[in-house]
Image (cartoon, grey):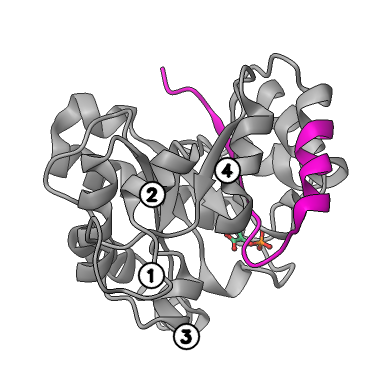
Amino acid sequence: MRRKLAAGNWKMNGTGASLAEIETLMKSHPAPGVDVLICPPATLIGRAAALAEGHVLAIGGQDCHAEASGAHTGDISAAMLKDAGATHVILGHSERRADHDESDGDVRAKCRAALAEGLVAVVCVGETLDEREAANTLDIIGGQLAGSLPDIASAHDLVIAYEPIWAIGTGKVPTTAQIGEVHDFIRTKLEQRYGAGVGRSVRILYGGSVKGSNAAEIFAVSNVDGALVGGASLTAGDFSPIVSALEEA
Ligand code: PEP
């Protein structure tokens, strides 16, 4: 049985005032029936983690460096995220792959570093619109999984997020059949890679323009174990209905 996960990615949004959204979210879901994760910008992780102490809401980072420490100005290691109170880290988000030229190999190295620190790695994969229109989606996803994931993972420390790039922040959402096809494919790949036990237990999130209005339909798709949400995670008012939809799924 996979415990469902509603994860919010605040990206480069939020200052101290935004912590009130986390407080409101926790009040709206004092004992959520699903896992809830907020990944604020790094500047807020410590304060967010302190705020969430004693609540099941988890706090995560949006990236980490593959090395533990060193001369990498502006970067943050997995150990630093953990020290600040993060329990999870998003890795290989398409915006990082594009903006920072991150390769599958980079994502894999970061993933190994995160797991070594005991963080849960939320590894993102997804195709461009051109790749989908050329009927290459599954090849692209298969390649990203093969290159980005570590050889050893457990059901608890790895989460996959399928995020079609053309659906992120655009309001466009794949059909439920398209989501189901990719999630089933990812499940098969995980079983082949890690064996049936781990492969069946790793959670697979869908991400890309998830909102309160479309969440229930997406959560009804097979092998969708929750969502990675960008824009609609920034306020408790938008994120709470998604958490509720997942609780009811
Ligand atoms: C994301 O960036 O991970 C994302 C899914 O964004 P949005 O929900 O805004 O499409």
Q: Earlier in the sequence, mark 2 or mark 4?
A: 4
Query: Total marks drawn?
Result: 4
Seen from the viewer's position, the closer of residues 99 and 52 is 52
For ligand 1, the image quadrant comes to: bottom right
Does ligand 1 reach within 8 Å of label 3's beta carbon? no
Q: Earlier in the sequence, mark 4 or mark 1?
A: 4
Residue contact between numbered discs 3 and 1, judged by CB atoms under 8 Å: no
Residue contact between numbered discs 2 and 1, judged by CB atoms under 8 Å: no
Q: CA distance from mark 3 to mark 2?
A: 37 Å
Q: What residue appears at the point 24 percent right and 66 percent down from the top-left corner?
A: 70
Q: Nearer the viewer, mark 2 or mark 1?
A: 2
Identify the residue under disc 2: 80
Seen from the viewer's position, the closer of residues 246 and 180 is 246
- Residue 249: where, in percent of width, then height? 65, 26
What residue type is disc 4 on? Gly
Residue contact between numbered discs 3 and 4, judged by CB atoms under 8 Å: no
What residue type is disc 2 on? Met
Quadrant where the N terminus is found in the figure: top left
Seen from the viewer's position, the closer of residues 92 and 212 is 92
Identify the residue under disc 1: 137
Query: In the image, is 156 to the left or to the right of 191?
Result: right
Q: CA distance from mark 4 to mark 1?
A: 38 Å
Picture layout, residue 98 above or below residue 196: below
Q: Earlier in the sequence, mark 2 or mark 1?
A: 2
- Residue 144: where, in percent of width, then height? 28, 65
Give, as a single range, the part of the protein colored magenta. Answer: 1-24
Q: Secondary structure at mark 4?
A: helix
Residue 118 in the magenta stretch? The answer is no
Q: Secondary structure at mark 3?
A: helix
- Other residues around mark 2 within 10 Å, as few (<14) / some (14–19) / many (≥20): some
Identify the residue under disc 3: 130
Identify the residue under disc 4: 46
